[in-house]
């Protein structure tokens, strides 16, 4: 089993989309391999809140329901629980690397990079944007999710 955690700032925009889109792509493959997906935020200010309504609406337009997700703060125990922690941008990756215990089980990387979709690529934060910003983020995440599913099948 592979356990994957997606991390962004507050766990209400990009990381719920990363979790939901990747889970959807994985389930569509009907793989016998077991993979679990979760998401968390670097900060806990949105803990317990559902994803941003714009993220929910964007996912819904593409046939994916993320409305049941709830934000949570990244815990130190996540570095032992998960095999892989992926984030959307270098700022979040730097924070992860600073918080990562020396005996961490989890590898930490950029989502676009690890998936093979785009080397050293970042997914911009759509929080201050409009519907177009969320659609652009959806497109990048979908590209990375597709690459990730292919890579996970090769492991």
Image (spheres, rainbow, N blue to C red):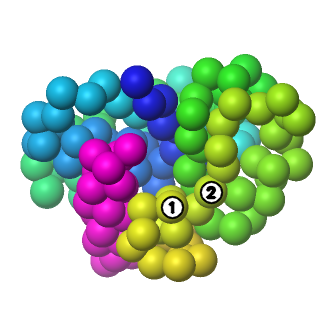
Q: Secondary structure at mark 1?
A: helix
Q: Nearer the viewer, residue 129 or 69?
A: 69
Q: Residue at x 77, y 32 (%)?
A: 104
Dominant SS of magenta comes to: helix
Classify residue 7 as left or right of residue 33.
right
Magenta stretch holds residue 136: yes
Classify residue 111 as left or right of residue 67.
right
Quarter the C terminus occupies: top left
> Is residue 9 something that shows in the picture?
no
Q: Say above or below: 92 vs 40.
A: below
Q: Residue at x 44, y 30 (%)?
A: 2
Q: Residue 112, how many percent across, how many down?
A: 47, 67
- Residue with the most extreme front position: 154
Q: Residue at x 69, y 24 (%)?
A: 80
Q: Residue 150, how many percent across, how many down?
A: 27, 55
Quarter the N terminus occupies: top left
Q: Which residue is mark 2?
A: 109
Q: Which of marks 2 and 1 precedes in the sequence? A: 2
> Is residue 82 something that shows in the picture?
yes
Q: Say above or below: 9 vs 126.
A: above
Q: Residues within 10 Å of mark 2 (few under 14, many from 20)?
A: many
Magenta stretch: give its range: 127-155
Q: Residue 61, how many percent across, how many down?
A: 13, 57
Q: Secondary structure at mark 2?
A: strand
Query: Total label count?
Result: 2
Q: Say above or below: 57 vs 114.
A: above
Classify residue 115 as left or right of residue 143.
right
Q: Are marks 1 and 2 in contact (CB under 8 Å)?
A: yes
Magenta stretch holds residue 123: no
The numbered dot on residue 80 is: none
Q: Which residue is mark 1?
A: 114
């Amino acid at each position: 089993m592979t356990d994957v955690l997606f991390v962004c700032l507050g766990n209400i925009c990009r990381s719920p989309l990363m979790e939901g889109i990747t889970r959807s792509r994985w389930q569509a493959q009907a793989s016998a391999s077991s993979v679990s997906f979760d998401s968390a935020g670097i900060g806990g200010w949105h803990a317990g809140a559902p994803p941003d309504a714009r993220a929910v609406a964007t996912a819904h337009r593409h046939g994916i329901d993320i409305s049941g997700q709830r934000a949570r703060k990244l815990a130190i125990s996540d570095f032992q629980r998960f095999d892989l922690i992926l984030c959307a941008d270098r700022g979040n990756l730097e924070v992860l690397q600073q918080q990562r215990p020396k005996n961490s089980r989890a590898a930490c990387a950029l989502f676009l990079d690890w998936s093979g979709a785009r080397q050293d690529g970042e997914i911009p934060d759509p929080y201050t944007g409009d519907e177009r910003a969320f659609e652009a983020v959806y497109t990048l995440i979908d590209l990375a999710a597709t690459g990730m599913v292919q890579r996970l099948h090769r492991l």
